[in-house]
Amino acid sequence: MPRIHFHQQLAEVKDKLLAMAALTQLAVDSSMEAYLNRDRALCKFVKQNERAIDTAQNEVDAMACELLAKEQPMAIDLRFLLATIKITGDLERIGDQARGIGRRTKEILKLEPVELPVDFAAMGEYAGHMIRSAVQALIEGDAALADTIRGMDDAIDRMNHNAYADLQQLIQQKPEYTRQALNAILIAKHLERIGDHASNIAIDVIFWKKGADVRHETTMAAEAAFSC
């Protein structure tokens, strides 16, 4: 009977973790919609939503720590709880990055509208896809899917690098748009960091399911490419 109760508590931790993940997905989607649609009200919503994410982190961490202390779980259950505490940290930071996008958007709305040389819709969609895939890997306990997410991080790094180069060129050619470009550079960086945190979540899923620390290893896909 005690073990049944323990696994019920584990399931509750996972449910609350997934609810927190849903809040962070909403934050990222809303922040990008605010930027693309020049929606000041959505910027305010993202800021309010961050408080809910912070509260969720505190609740999940407290539950996980209590189970670690009282139940002293072994093997895969122990790894799940340790991974959970790390994942909540990354989810909370994704919320911070989304709020940063909202903050930059509010600054841009004060300025003259300018067509910028960056496809933020595509970059935001890619970052969102990384988060959704990481959450799916978490839901399904799918280490193989998690490994593919790690491989996606290079693409969003390139997007950020290209955005920086293009916006820097805009500043040089049209210095009157410097403030718009600088805020856009920060938005691109926030999206790149969101991708980093999604990759971190994937790494923690792999640790949970396989007991492997792959932080400093290449992905399976990359290894296959190098072996060809």
Image: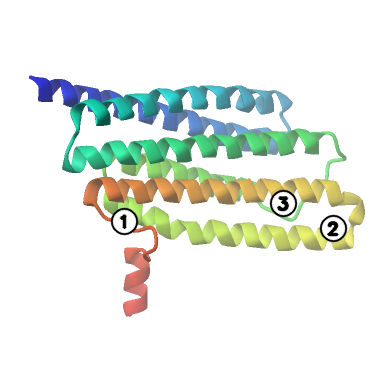
Q: Nearer the viewer, residue 139 or 70?
A: 70
Q: How many marks?
A: 3
User: Which residue is drawn at the image coordinates 55% and 34% (left, top)?
Assistant: 95
Left or right: residue 49 versus residue 132 is right
Kind of residue at disc 1: Asp
The residue sitting at the bottom extreme is 228
Residue that badge 3 annotates? 185
Provide the residue designation for mark 2.
171
Q: CA distance from mark 2 to mark 3?
A: 11 Å
Around disc 2, counting alpha carbons within 10 Å, would you say few (fewer than 14), some (14 to 19), or many (20 or more)? Answer: some
Residue 64 pos. (x, y %): 31, 29
Q: Could you give the CA–CA distance between mark 1 and mark 3, rounded to whole angstroms?
A: 33 Å
> Which one is closest to the eye, mark 2 or mark 1?
1
Mark 3 residue element? helix
Q: Disc 1 on helix, strand or loop?
A: loop
- Say which label, 1 or 3, has the lower sequence index: 3
Residue plotted at (31% across, 56% down): 213
- Residue 125 on image: x %, y %: 54, 45
The residue that mark 1 highlights is 213
